Amino acid sequence: MKPIDKIIKACKKNKAWAQAELFERYSDKMFGTCLYYSDSKADAEDLLHDGFLQIFKNIGKYKQDNIEAWMRRVFINLALMQFRKTKLDTLSIEEDEVSDLNANTEDNVNMNADELQALINKLPSQYRLVFNLYAIEGYKHREIAEMLDITEGTSKSNLSRARNILQNKLQKLNDI
Amino acid sequence: MNEKNNIDEIFKNAAQQYSATAPKGAWGSIDASLKAQSRMLFIKKLSVAAVISVVSIVAAVVVFNSSDIDVAQLDDNTNTTPKNTLNTKSEQVTDNTISYNDDVPKLETKNKEIIVEANTEAIVNNANSVVVENIAIDNKSEVSIVAVEKTPNKISVAAVDKENNVDKSIHLNKLIENIDEDIVGSESIDIDSKVAPTISKEPQESIISINEKSTNDKLVIETKVIENSSIEETPIQEQEKLINKSILEEIAINEDKPEVTIENEVINPEELKNNNTSSFKYFIGSTISAAITNAVSVAPATPNKDMAVAGSVNTEIGYGASVDIGIRKDNWIFTTGIRRYDHKVSGDFTVNEHNPYNVDADNYGYSALGVISLFNVNTNARLANPSSAIYVQDFDEYSIRLRYVDIPITIGYELKINNWSVIPYVGINSTIILSNEVKMSKDDKIFMYGEVKDVNSIMLGITTGGGLYYNIGKRWLLGLNTDFIYYPSSVSYSKDYTYKPYSLLVGPRVEFRF
């Protein structure tokens, strides 16, 4: 297996073999990220395409130690840009999606990763982004508010609602 | 709080581990987009190079234009008392003792030009006993020229309406062949009626060219004397030197025929200029070009299809230079020369880590590309006609470099607009391939590096092209040249390996005419 630094070095020289190698190595992982940040699989495929083009275009600027984290950032930034373009997303939430916070989630730890991703994917865009950025990426509400061009209060509110929805769905799945 | 954190942790852990199989064809579309971007970048670079070339040409034109005014170098003695003078429209010049007009206006010298007030009589006398007289009254112009003894006597004169600017000039072309030993005399020119100017002959060994320019209410008269000997040797070329691009008045003398004949015809200023610039018979030129060339047919398929999906060619470049000579006949241009070009076609192979290709290089070489020698980096030795199999595993770069010398023969036609020339041309070219090199490597390690056999060493191609050039002075052309070269037959004999190269070359060209 070729060392990643050699692949990156060759990518910086626009070597096609290295670009193919980088894609080969990280495409599945990044497609997973795309699915987390997209409304649909088709959108995720578009994001994957655009993201890798961005990566190959800007890889000359990459100077960090963790290529995967850097690539992930590129995809998330692209998803955020896309979100800001189509921000007028109606936050229609069905009543039954909101549940109490007392549901037991211990049993859900063993749930399939695909099922969890599917739950995330069903969230409204803004809820999903806030939840992903806060819970998965570890951003603060202030940073999320800036990224999504919303208030901190909205960010907190969206997070809370997203949690409620997810917990409710987890509970339902658990009951089944 | 714990519940919240618990949910967050569940999804965080799941997300960090999560991956999904990328859709098939994803890389294909990304690769296609990358290639499109790469091509666009190349075209942009080529465009920038073309713009820089054009800007350079324009800059050169501006610089050379600023020095054009010095082309007509005037004798410092021009302001001296004239030996021959004319002061009316009909007066005949008979000898050197004719009295001259007392009302000769004051002459003002600026940068070797003599500026005379318009709408007044003006007499300019050259120190070498050649008289140039220009009389302007009410938009009428008179030019009287005293030619000389023992000179060739073909005279061509263009007179100019000096009241107006150059574009409104009227040019008269007169040919006087074999001026009689006696004085021919002078004659006035009526611009409106396009009457011929007077040509006279004096016992002097010189010839004169007049160059007039009107600038507002000023009349600029430029004169030039050329020694007779040089006229006899290369009369046409010397004549060329004297032509100012704005307005032409020229005299050439020829002594072929005994009778004096006068042709009085009005010619277009552009035609007059064309006639002069095209009077150079030969030229030598040079072009430096960058090229877009086509992809080779990548790697051929070996019987077991090892190489069939070996990758994609993503770089096609060419570059080179040429020197050519040519001959002109009227506006037709016949050119031959020598061009030296390189094509480099590189392919980056996307060999999958999980699916390495094992290629029998020897078999590959002989059966497909016909590699006649291989350079093995492991043994640091080149194998000529290798018989033992060399297994190339998982290589990632493949390139073919074609070096050739090309001898084109073209025919073109020059179209002139002011000082610009457009020359389209077509022709054929014989090409001698100097080398056809194949290289396969992985990272910086070369697996195969050798000459390709089974290639045509001589090929016949077709070439077409053209250029836009600016005439700098009388002899130099500078411009942008394009060539399209195509070889209808493949470089390779092999049916497995087809390469019919073409090149679209663009680059600056300089040409010298003599």
Image: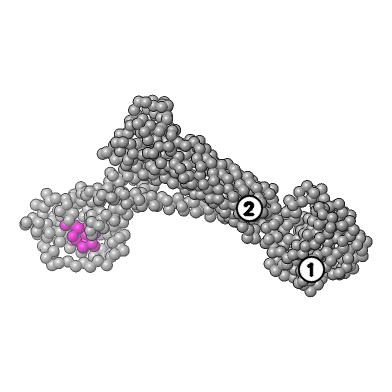
What's the magenta bit mostly, secondary-structure-wise? helix
The image shows residue B201, relative to residue B408, as above or below, that is: below
Most foreground residue, B34 or B427: B427
What is the residue that sits farthest to the bottom in this orientation? B138
Residue B202 location (% of width, % of height): 88, 57
Q: Earlier in the sequence, mark 2 or mark 1?
A: 1
Q: Is residue B132 magenta?
A: no
Most foreground residue, B55 or A73: B55
What is the residue that sits farthest to the right in this orientation? B97
Q: Quadrant of residue B252?
A: bottom right
Is residue B16 at least partly visible in the picture?
A: no
Residue B347 location (% of width, % of height): 39, 42
To which residue does mark 1 refer? Answer: B195
To which residue does mark 2 refer? Answer: B332
Q: Which residues are magenta?
A: A119-133
Q: Residue at x 33, y 32 (%)?
A: B360
Same chain letter for marks 2 and 1: yes
What is the residue that sits farthest to the left in this orientation? A175
Residue B493 location (% of width, % of height): 43, 37
Q: Chain of mark 1?
A: B
Q: Quadrant of residue B146?
A: bottom right
Most foreground residue, B350 or B170: B170
Q: CA distance from mark 2 to mark 1?
A: 33 Å
Identity, as a three-letter code, of the amino acid under mark 1:
Val
Dot 2, how many residues are within 10 Å of its Cα: few (below 14), some (14-19), or many (20+)?
some
Q: Residue at x 25, y 63 (%)?
A: A152
